[in-house]
Image: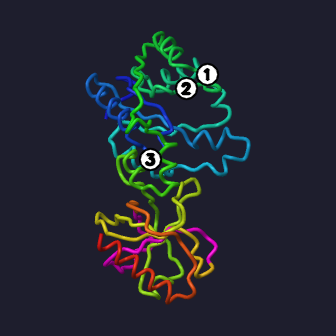
Amino acid sequence: MNDLENCGSAVTIGNFDGQHIGHARLFELVKEHAARVGLASLVLSFYPHPAFVLRKDGSQQDFKLITSYAERRRNIEALGFDRFIEHPFTEDFARTEPWVFLKFLSDEMNCRALYIGGDYRFGRDKTGSMEDFSGYADELGIKVNIVPDVEMNGVKVSSTAIKRFIIDKDLAGAASFLGRPYEISGVVRRGFQRGRAIGFPTANIIPPPEKLLPPDGVYETRVSLNGAVYKAMTNIGKNPTFNAVRRTVESHLFGFCQDITGCEINAAFIRFIRDERRFVNADELTEQLKRDAAFISST
């Protein structure tokens, strides 16, 4: 691992929600440059997401992230950067003048090369343009590299576009922009054992409040557990047949019935199967689950 103080760093900055294929291009370029010239590779992100701090109209309560903070950290750290920094984002930090922010990169991270997207803005009220960045950077010995947006079928790859795919239950579209399936990770919690009672035991997780979930319904998924991957069906919703009130994510792993309470699982969403609905009784629900499982297993 390279040392920031002695060798300097190559840095990319962003919220990196979703860690999509556009972000992957930035990550790749930073790591390549750092390795080529002997710099430390560094990702600078923010906690919490600026939208949760800056929005004052109440909309921050409805703002959701494709990847939770824990998922973001896990995904980025797995890429092998020398350093991943989640800098606290506050109202005071948001008021930082552009030149002060750039000086912060130089002083605190010994930044020598900076990789950013073409639409990146920095500093107070996002007043720092690319031209400003280059001018300030030259004085501090930082080389700014502006990376063009990644497009697919003429559409810019962005977190906003991916969120729309997820909300529209277009999991294939989301996967194409993410470079992998949309995922929900979490620790399995003990539920009411209703699924086990009707022959469909489930692993239940409660995602963090910042996590964007697809609409309520049944989905085909692949669940990773302790290095193994299981075909599964996952229900998102409140289990209206049983008059539940809390929205949960419950995965039934095909051919698996062990108690995994306390274990961490990762559910990769493949496709939407059907909407969640209220059934007359548990027997009617069981028959529908059998049909859902048969459909997923046969395709």
Q: Position of residue 151 (x, y in %)?
A: 39, 35
Mark 3 is surrounded, within 10 Å at the Cα level, by few (under 14), some (14 to 19) or many (20 or more) other residues, namely some
Q: Quadrant of residue 6?
A: top left
Q: What kind of residue is marked 2?
A: Arg
SS label for mark 1: loop
Residue that numbered label 2 is attached to: 121
Residue shown at 47%/69% (left/top)? 274
Q: How is the image coloured?
A: rainbow
* Amino acid marked by disc 3: Arg
Find out whether residue 247 is within the magenta segment.
yes
Which element is circle 2 on?
Answer: loop
From the viewer's side, name the closer residue of 45 and 272.
Answer: 272
Quarter of the C terminus within the rendering = bottom left
**Type of residue at label 1?**
Thr
Q: Which residue is mark 3?
A: 73
Mark 2 / mark 1, whichever is N-terminal: 2
